[in-house]
Amino acid sequence: MIVAKKELLIKSIALAGSSLQLVISVIITVLYVQLRQTGTTDQFLFQSSYVWFAPLKIYFSSGIDGISLAMILMTALVVLAGVLVSWKINKQVKEFFFLLIVLSLSAYGFFITTNLFVMFFFLELAVIPKFLLIGMWGSGRKEYSSMKLALMLMAGSALVFLGMIGLFYASGMQSWDIQDIAKLNIPIATQRVLYLLLFTGFGVFTAMFPFHTWAPDGHSSAPTAASMFLAGISMKLGAYGCLRVATYLLPGAAQELSWIFIILASIAIIYGAFATMMQKDLKYMNAYSSVSHVGFIILGIAMLTKVAITGAVMQMVSHGIMTALFFAAIGMIYDRAHTRQANELGGMLKQIPFIGTAFIISGLTSLGLPGFSGFVSEMTVFVGSWERAGIFYRGATILAAASIVVTAVYILRAIGFAIWGNITNKEFLKLKDATWSERTATVLLVVGILIIGLAPFLFVHLINLDTTTIYQKLISNVLVH
Amino acid sequence: MDNVLLFRFEIIIAALILMLLVMSLRDFNTKVTAFLGTMNVLLLVNFLIGWLPMYTGSYFSGFFRTTDLIVFEKNILNLGILLISLTSYQWLKKSEHRLEFYFLMLSSIMGVFVMLSSGHILMLYLGVEMSTIPIAAMSNFNLDEKRSSEAGLKLILSSAFSTGIMLFGISLLYGAVGNLSFDSVIANLHPDMLTLFAFTFILAGFAFKMSIVPFHLWTADVYEGSPIAVTNFLSVISKGSVVFVFLTILYQLFGGLKDEWLYAISILSILSMTVGNLFALRQQNAKRFLAFSSIAQVGFVLVGVAGASVMGSTSVVYFILIYLLSNIAAFGVIGAMADSTGSESLQSFKGLYKSNPFYALFMVVALFSLAGVPPVAGFFGKLFLLTAGMNSKLYVLLGFAGVNLVLSLYNYLRVVKYMFIDEAVTTVPPLQRNRQLTIALVTCTIGLLIIGFIPAIYQYIDQICRM
């Protein structure tokens, strides 16, 4: 009894904490919007700075702009949903929620800081909790998957760090701050090297092809909440880094070399979609479809037009929420039916209608049905990409758009097999529908999807100033060699 | 009087040694608890006195010198011997040779202090010898064990060999420069053939002491054969102090040969990191594992050394402080395991978190620190070394350092996996707690967790390195 009480206490604290996070981030959003409406034009608002390692010019400096604000909102939403979905965890509860909280802290830290070293600190901070979450609460080949994930992410972060030291030295060892480095005019030869290092390094975190292999294994072994965090938040750390550090700070090299990442993103989109078709396991399915969807983010960033970048940011948030919902739904089904094989399930909508509906909504978002967030963000990426004239860019855009058809095939097939139809397995007749915590989590995430899907202008408005800043920086540097 | 006070650290150590003699005359060391308690208190006092304000300057016409940096280094080492004494409490309680252990350890630390303070190469040589020979006797401590005597013999032979090489280099240097005091060597150094030869031999001698690849072959065997307390001393105090001296040697004494040694150092660094990490991959004995890990760690230190700047020496000193805490904690846990299970195999760590959560947490903090995982201090230590290393623009070296970050993470995560994820093969009984070990482990762990968040420490080291 004492143990049970304590478990409940821990869970309640985690729930209260994550609700508080959501409330705080909404408050910050409101304040931010108000400040912007009064005409504040600083790039980052709410700036503050604390000395950390002064001789090395490392300051804990924070500042929020529209993009990081969007990411923070998304993180808060996914964290809260993740805590709610994990309500049934009963093994080593304290450690589980502790690690979840460390993960969410690292994500917030990463998004709000403007100091590259601090950013890296938080990026790395997120690696080990993932390792432990998968290793300790995972299933299947958890040792292999967790080790693979940790090592690949560490390799990515080693690349990132080398790139960041490069930026530090490029500033004459004066600053790690994004705002200072953005003012520099880094020689193009240095830019090329650093761009490749940083984009590839962050790309590993984003599960960019061909560095995506940690994602399917990791997701399939991870407990539900860890999957939601991994795909929802962690992958976005990488995408945010690709945009904010690699592209924004090294515009010259981005103009020259982004074609490499356009190719990789196109491959990821097509390959991810076809690989998804081959999967029977729902988690593997969503993991590969994440690879494909994250490809859109990379594509949007690498296309370097304002609309494409807006689309990429939208896709980050949209995919974050959507994939969290997807993994939550899969996790709920798995908890009950103890299988994730699409062909072994069936008739879930009849037996557990709430979870079935959640699955369908996330599926429809994933395939880009208008009204949901997936449609607007992918559409924006395509429109933005189409702005880049030239057969190469057009080709990549067409390929990416074509993948939507494949997405529709696998999503509809999964829904058809697992959710619709008749209950084939008698065991499933005993299944119970979602609990209160699962319902709350689902509703929260669906609301997030609908807000972006039905009122994308709110979102565009939020990040408009910042995408403009990034775009201005990109075009202003075209001629500097 | 001022000048005598320059020797404060050495005088206190000498006083402690004399006290030990008195104690042995009085047979005080047979009263186990009282004796060990007294020694711990004395070492604590020794550590605390070290922080009193200190004159700096030189004495014996430059043979002996003291700077703020040297004082700080001695303080770190004092902390080290205190913690080692605390962690080995259980072992010392059972051992008959408590007194000798302290006697030899203090003699060795005396040599280390002389070495650190030396302003003349002969003095340096004297210090190096004085610090090594007692360790050889210490590693032979488990008298009834064959591998312990093997370790002692190996250590004495290899260190005799390495000091021989170093001495040869010193004599060549004398031939080239004509005087062995640091100042005149610095003033008269020319990058001619003879000097380069001299430097190479001296470098090889130090590389032996720091067990840098390819001079590392003695390390694993000696670490495995020696008692855990001695291994701890070897890997932390002996290695750390030589790294400190090595900084002086490279940056000041051979500062004029920077263009030459930069490449030598980067090659040694690449070899050490890579070989250390690769060999650690498959080790099953905890001590051998940490031996190879410490080889890899020294490789990392050399990345910072190759930075050849104030940032380089700052980050090296900072890193050694962190490395000392992490290694002592790791050895402390291994010692506790060996005491109660009798096994030094990493396999016995399986499922440790379920049976002994506290020890598992201490161990995991130490391992994360060695691997460089935030928010543990090792993260900052390692990354500052890398940042400093960038200064010399040796991109290949940095590339290898990046690869080795991943390799070393695998090594340490393997142990973390054993403790947290795997099921126990044979359940480890709850380990005996003793207050001394707990104090030491808690100190190390708290240190490792907060050092990164106290900017003042790095700032202070930076300040004393600039002087």
Image (cartoon, grey):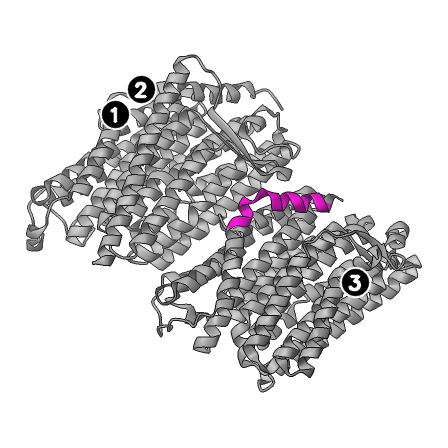
Residue B142, placed above or below residue A226 = below
List the residue tagged with mark 1.
A451
User: What x and y, as percent, mark residue B379?
Assistant: 53, 49
Mark 2 in CB contact with mark 1 (< 8 angstroms): yes
Asked whether A214 or B26 is in front, the reply is: B26
Can residue A278 be spotted in the picture? no
- Chain of residue at mark 2: A
First in residue order: circle 2 vs circle 1? 1
Q: Position of residue B311 (x, y in %)?
A: 68, 44
Residue in front for this viewpoint, B10 or A192: B10
Residue at 63%, 68% (x, y): give it. Answer: B234
Name which residue type carries label 2.
Answer: Leu
Left or right position of B234 against B450: right
Instruction: Report how far apart the C-alphas of labels 3 and 1 lie in the structure.
Output: 70 Å
- Where disc 1 sits, the SS reads helix
Identify residue type, mark 3: Ile
Q: Is residue B390 left or right of residue B331?
A: right
Q: Nearer the viewer, residue B390 or B310?
A: B310
Q: Which residue is mark 3?
A: B202
Residue drawn at (66%, 79%) of the image: B100
Secondary-structure class at tag 2: helix
